[in-house]
Amino acid sequence: MTGLSNAAKRDIETVLHPYTNLDTFRSTGPLIIERGEGIHVFDSEGKEYIEGMAGLWCTSLGYSEAELIERGEGIHVFDSEGKEYIEGMAGLWCTSLGYSEAELIDAATEQMRQLPFGHVFGGRSHERAAELAEKLKAIAPHDASKVLFCGSGSEANDQQIKLLWYYNNAKGRPEKKKIISRLQGYHGVTIASGSLTGLPANHMDFDLPIERIFHTGSPHYYRQGEAGESEEEFSARRAQELEELILREGPETVAGFIAEPIMGAGGVVMPPQGYFEKIQAVLDKYDIYFISDEVICGFARTGNMFGAETFGMKPDSISVAKALSSAYVPIGAVTIGEDMYQAMIDESKKIGTFGHGFTYTAHPVAAAVACKTLEIYEKRDILSHVRAVAPTFEKRVLGFADHPLVGNARAKGLIGAIELVADKETKKSFDKSAAIGAVAMGAAQKHGLIVRALAGDIIAFCPPLIIKEDEIGEMFDRMARALDDVEAHVQKEGLRG
Ligand code: PLP
């Protein structure tokens, strides 16, 4: 720990860091970001970087009319008619709008002043909850009837599983419970959402996945396509494997399938030609509920409001979080269709209550910030902005394919990645001990750019959606300088073997 600042030492001794080698971290210490402005962040020494990886006890009151709580003061809350109540039951690829969006700060501040906490249990509500649900329903890529809020992407996907199980019980098909996810997919880290995730590090020694959750092959054509196999043929193979898995398990036992439109944490893996069309046909054939995990792809990231639209998916439901609030406050959500809603009504009538909810479900400050975020997307037409700058972003990422280190480059909208290889012809990876991804991430950092190295020496790019054309140019100029440094390092150390 020698040579580290006091702040870094404090951090090492107090904070358990996810996705970190906890052993080496003790000597490397953290990169402490102190301040953000637009697409830039600054470390504790004032160094500037382009952020290239845009990061109850319940009283069941039955179905009585919702009470709208409008204002709070001390131990009191006030409803829309001014009636005062003593509150006797005392109640997280993502900064889409950058780091200094005053309107979001104001929205949070105003909501804090007005009603810093309100819940939606037992028929209670507050205006921001419905306002946000309406906005989400209006833009959802399927016929959404209701929105169930939560605090994160993991919670959203956890809820998806619970809702699907609840629904199939309500529908009188208790055997239809298995959920299929994909290897390399990332859906969170709770016991259930972590089980959906298809990455070894999220399962190993956590005793995951749990039963009833299965994984089918990943859509990574560059790595898993066979010699001579076209993208279309690879997609057909993956769809066939999915069908074989369903038939093996028994179609009557398979409830759902979950997929990210573009896999994020698993390596920014793009769906190959024809992929979702073929997968969709299998799902339709066996009456399998399709969940699009839009936690990264949602809200204009891929050049449409949702990734499902970009890739022609026909989901029954979506999971959202992150850019829902530009990550200024933690909030996530799940949308459901009318059929599921009706079944849930029947089930909760039978049981007496819909026995699910978090203290922070539809937290008013989070909901207010999310409402403002969606309002900003609309009034500033962020979608048109993304469509206008995406060609430059995509061209710059794809341009790296000419670099001696880059085996594959991929981009869509404002998300992309490059895969670093020792040999471009054979796609041979560098030896793990070379940690080339981490070296490239460090080199980018040195040139003032934060990117993320994913497993497989994949460097991911996902800047705030507000990034401008010239800033995209600057971001990738810095990355190009970093790659040249890495190439010099590879040659000096003789890492190509
Ligand atoms: N789903 C996807 C596609 C994600 O990328 C993530 C997080 O990166 C999650 C779910 C989990 O979200 P959270 O970290 O907010 O729990």
Image (spheres, helix red, strand yellow):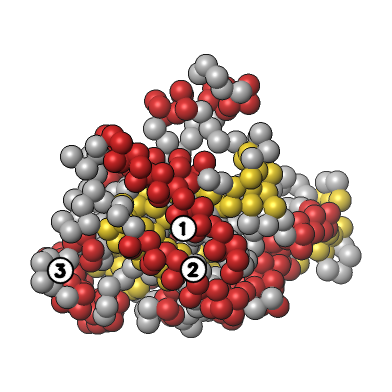
Q: Amino acid at mark 3?
A: Glu
User: Distance from label 3 to label 2 (Cα)?
Assistant: 34 Å
Query: Does 207 appear above or below 218?
Result: above
Mark nearer the viewer, 1 or 2: 2
Q: Is residue 415 visible?
A: yes
Judged left or right of residue 456, residue 15 is: right
Quarter holding residue 442: top left
Q: Earlier in the sequence, mark 1 or mark 2?
A: 2
SS type, badge 2: helix
Residue positioned 85% across, 46% down in the render: 74
Task: Say if mark 1 contacts mark 2, CB within 8 Å.
Answer: yes
Percent x, y for residue 356? 51, 57
Mark 1 = which residue? 461
Mark 2 = which residue? 393
User: Distance from label 1 to label 3 (Cα)?
Assistant: 31 Å
Percent x, y for residue 167? 39, 69
Q: Is residue 123 visible?
A: no
Residue 241 marker: 3
Residue positioned 55% across, 36% down in the render: 31
SS type, badge 1: strand
Task: Say if mark 1 contacts mark 3, CB within 8 Å.
Answer: no
Q: Earlier in the sequence, mark 3 or mark 2?
A: 3
Percent x, y for residue 149? 56, 62
Task: Out of 369 and 309, give the one closest to the viewer.
Answer: 309
Query: Does 25 appear above or below 65?
Result: above
Percent x, y for residue 444? 48, 46
Q: Amino acid at mark 2?
A: Phe
Task: Out of 148 and 329, give the one closest to the viewer.
Answer: 329
Mark nearer the viewer, 3 or 2: 2
The C terminus - image quarter:
top left
